Image (cartoon, helix red, strand yellow):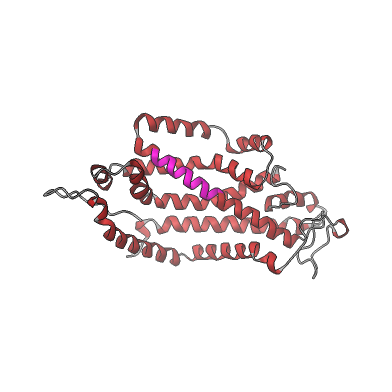
Amino acid sequence: MATRERRPAAAALPRPGAAEEAPAGAGGRETGGSLRLILATFAENRTAVAGLVLIILITLFCFAGPLLYRTNQVTVQLGIAKLPPSGRYPLGTDPSGYNVLGRLMLGGQSSLELGFAVSIATTVLGTLYGAVAGLAGGVVDAVMMRVIDTFLAIPSLVLLLILVNVFSPNLWVIILLLTFVSWLAIARLVRGEVLTLRTREFVQAAKMMGAGRQRIVLRHLVPNAIGVIVVNATFTVADAILTLSALSFLGLGLPPPQADWGGMLSNGLNYLFDGYWWMVYPPAIILIITVVAFNLIGDAIRDSLDVRLQRP
């Protein structure tokens, strides 16, 4: 968590590097205590624990499930297409003859991989960009923020639709495109945090001791803005999964035989009014549960980092 603020000594100048070495142990003890307090506050939130359990179960279902329940998700089998749920096919089959239960697992792998990859990439890129802009200030900050404002002026979904039509969509291309339009928000948030932190005494002390900008950003500014970063990263996972579903619903998602929950919804809606409910309800339900679970975790992390809600 936060690095302990330390006032420079008035009596004598410390040796070079002492301002950063001295608080290391104290900062470690403070960080350890703060981390335990945050975890305790998180554990007391029953909805957060429920969300975490749901994410673990869904992850096991998507990645461990295919090892126990093997299905053919490559070959089209029209002879068994649109079969209702039965003992052999617990959730029926779709118009291509794919087992819907196995398709849910395969689609979940793509959705979760994309969500986590986009979250990590946007967090790293946006955090570094925002921290550099906030620390630099002046003209550099103004120019860097105008770049963000320019991209924010373009609706992200419209920009994604244009880019997906330009580039042949696959999982990695969509990850890069979503990262390209998703890092702007975290950059602005981190920049705002850094603007308030850069005038704090521990940052000024580090500058007086000759610490470079890279060290100030990585050792002082980013750790003290970790709350905003982690909360935003959690919500980004859910947003990325929903965006992939929206692209797939519009027919611009992953190409066959790859699958995702949005693509399953898009394909199943054509048959919903004919009574083939098992093609729509399972992917819709698991998509909703996954997004809600990530949002519950994000809310709980935000509450855990709020000192007003922590119990000493």
In the image, residue 178 lies at what x, y percent? 58, 43
Magenta segment, prevailing SS (helix, strand or loop): helix
Range of residues picked out in magenta: 118-132
Give the quadrant of the N terminus: bottom left
Q: Is residue 62 above or below residue 3?
A: below
Q: For the point 63% across and 43% down, which residue is it?
A: 173
Q: Quadrant of residue 136?
A: top left
| Vertical placement of residue 232 versus 311, above or below | above
Residue 150 falls within the magenta-colored stretch: no
Residue at 35% over, 64% down: 311
The answer to whether residue 128 is magenta is: yes
- Report the residue at 60% width, 54% height from top: 113
**Relative image position of residue 57 (x, y in whole percent):** 60, 66
Residue sitting farthest toward the right: 79
Q: Is residue 161 left or right of residue 98?
A: left
Nearer the observer, 192 or 223:
223
Q: Which residue is painted at 68% across and 52% down in the image?
A: 260
Viewer-side residue, 7 vs 305? 7
Judging depth in this view, the residue of 110 and 86 nearest the camera is 110
Drawn side of residue 222 relative to residue 68, left or right: left
Residue 37, horizontal then vertical, whole percent: 36, 64
